[in-house]
Amino acid sequence: MASESWLERAGGLLGYLWQSTICGVLNLRRRLFKRRLPDYVVLTLDADLLEREPDVPWYYTFLPIYSAPLSLETIAGALRRVAVDPDVKGVLFLFKGATLSLAQAQSLASLCEHFRGWDRAQHGHKAGFAAKQVVAHLEEVTAATFVAACAADRITLAPLAEWDVTGLLATPTFFKDLLARLGVEFDVVRVAPWKTAADSFLFNGLTDAAREQYNWLFDSLFGTIVGAVAGGRNLPEQMVRDLVDRAPLGAAAALAAGLVDQVLYEDELPALLGQAERPARCKAYGRVRGLLRRQPRRSAACDVGVISLVGSIMTGESRSFPVALPILGEETIGSSTAQQLIRRARRDDSLGAVIVHVDSPGGSALASDLIWRELVLLNQEKPLIVYMGDVAASGGYYIAAPGRQIVAQPATITGSIGVIMAKPVTAGAFKKLGVGWDTVQRGAHADLASSLTPWEGEPRQAVEESLQHYYGAFKQRVAEGRKLPLAAVDDLAGGRVWTGEQALAKGLVDHLGDFERAIELACVEAGLPTDGRVRVVPVAAGGRWLAGEPRRAVEVMLGLAGLRQVAGVVDLLAGGEFARLLARERVWLLADMLPRIRF
């Protein structure tokens, strides 16, 4: 072991020396082209913002038609690079129709604070230190974009833009009457009164429980927005609430109220950020990243691995669909795919800890439990930190429960501890169409999943008993993972949905923060340095198929899984696999009727 430790240290030193050589060469090039360096590095937010960089083949970057989507991970890397460079004065965010969730806005605001800390750590000890500035220029304003912008040192607004922070609005739709006209009814069994996943098919409006839930969620989310604006703009909270009630406000009114610092066009920013005789040079990050100062860093003994579990949870392999599907959305987390990733992380000795990024409204109960089991086994061998994105509810919370530490943003939607089972009853529709049927059956419950017969009498009792079993298992998983008594879990369950802020107070999460906070916790749990030396690496798919311990399967044929996935999408769109998929998954841990909030 001593020799191995010596070899590791020697390898680390050689790696550092190699890094120093490469960085020295690149920094020499930087000095030669120093005049091309900008005063402000520009980051443009003009589309959907992802949490993590997508896992795409390496050759995608060379395709002229491929444009990598912007992610918080990319922005974090850019801010680290800018913070290190002594000749850059700051960063300029251009908000041009960016689509952000409130949780993403909070993460972006946190990154601005990290940026200031990285800048101080790098240059704060130097004489005449001038902190780098964060500037936000808004061409249109929503609640989420303004929450992010409030972390900036200066906010500017386009002259004809409006401060459109009008509050929160959710307008759930209901299809009961429409389905009745078609002769379709929904048969639903649930063991949790706040489990609203099928309410749009059962009712014509919000139930008392659903309305109560919307209200406590809105109270928390609205308070988060008001607090961020008040703190960022140094305004009283009541004044912010009054401004929201008056919105939308024109640019001049927003300036008078202290919501922004200047009203101007984008082309006027260089003069504002520089001097009259020398306007500031503002250049896009993509154009100048190669010129920014490089800094070698010693590597730590281990890395931190990252697994992203995004989408609805289903059995089988993960899939992405060209259009959003009912219930499933655009992406699914396949239990088989997730198992392989988790097993790979578990057996990778180079990983000292693992962060699992969960962004899911749940899905199949069986698939959730299969993923949960693998995460439990992973956490027994190395620290598991769960980072929640926009949503980690129902099955999404089920798979988060094994986390040694759970991090969420105040606006993350989580909880929804409950179970539901539903099916459409289409006998009336067939009758309207003049379609008849007959039945041959063996087994009293052979027609349990049939859409021709409702659950009545003993079959309904069987379904209820099954759901009680799943519900009990769900609560037990949460009690064990969160180290809570079952009675306390009962008070938090029942399908109730919480914001991250509320979940922290109730013990369902451990910390409020962004992905950087999750990295810090992973390093602490693994006994690794927290000074930025630890590499954060995605856990890669591919390679050998890893069977559950102790057995191992033979290597999967190269490319076979990808071919099956392509064929599966074709079959789904053309051959009705969607119906078969839903028929296969009977018991759901799904928080589908979450607030569709307009920001």
Image (spheres, rainbow, N blue to C red):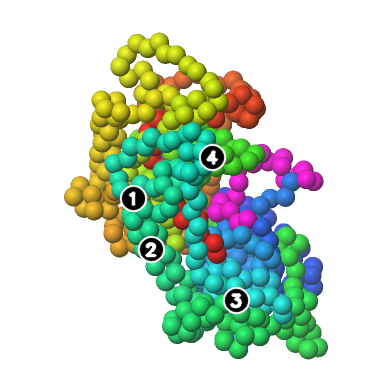
Check the image and report above or below for 229 versus 181.
below
Q: Which residue is mark 3?
A: 248
Classify mark 4: residues with Cα within 10 Å, few (<14), some (14-19) or many (20+): few
User: Residue at image x 42%, y 13%?
Assistant: 439
Position of the N terminus by quadrant: top left
Residue position marked by numbered label 2 in the rendering: 215
Q: Are marks 4 and 1 in contact (CB under 8 Å)?
A: no
Report which residue position mark 1 lands on: 194
The disc placed on residue 326 is 4
Q: Residue at x 61, y 83 (%)?
A: 254
Camera-nearest residue between 317 and 575: 575
Residue at image position (67%, 78%) is 157
Q: Is residue 58 magenta?
A: yes
Label 3 with label 1: CB-CB less than 8 Å:
no
Q: Secondary structure at mark 1?
A: loop
From the viewer's perspective, tell me whether residue 579 is left or right of residue 409: right
Q: Are marks 2 and 4 in contact (CB under 8 Å)?
A: no
* Mark sitting earlier along the chain (4/3): 3
Kindly indicate whether the residue at mark 2 contacts the one at mark 3 (C-beta within 8 angstroms). Answer: no
Give the CA separation, mark 1 to mark 2: 13 Å
Q: CA distance from mark 3 to mark 1?
A: 34 Å
Mark 2: amino acid? Asn
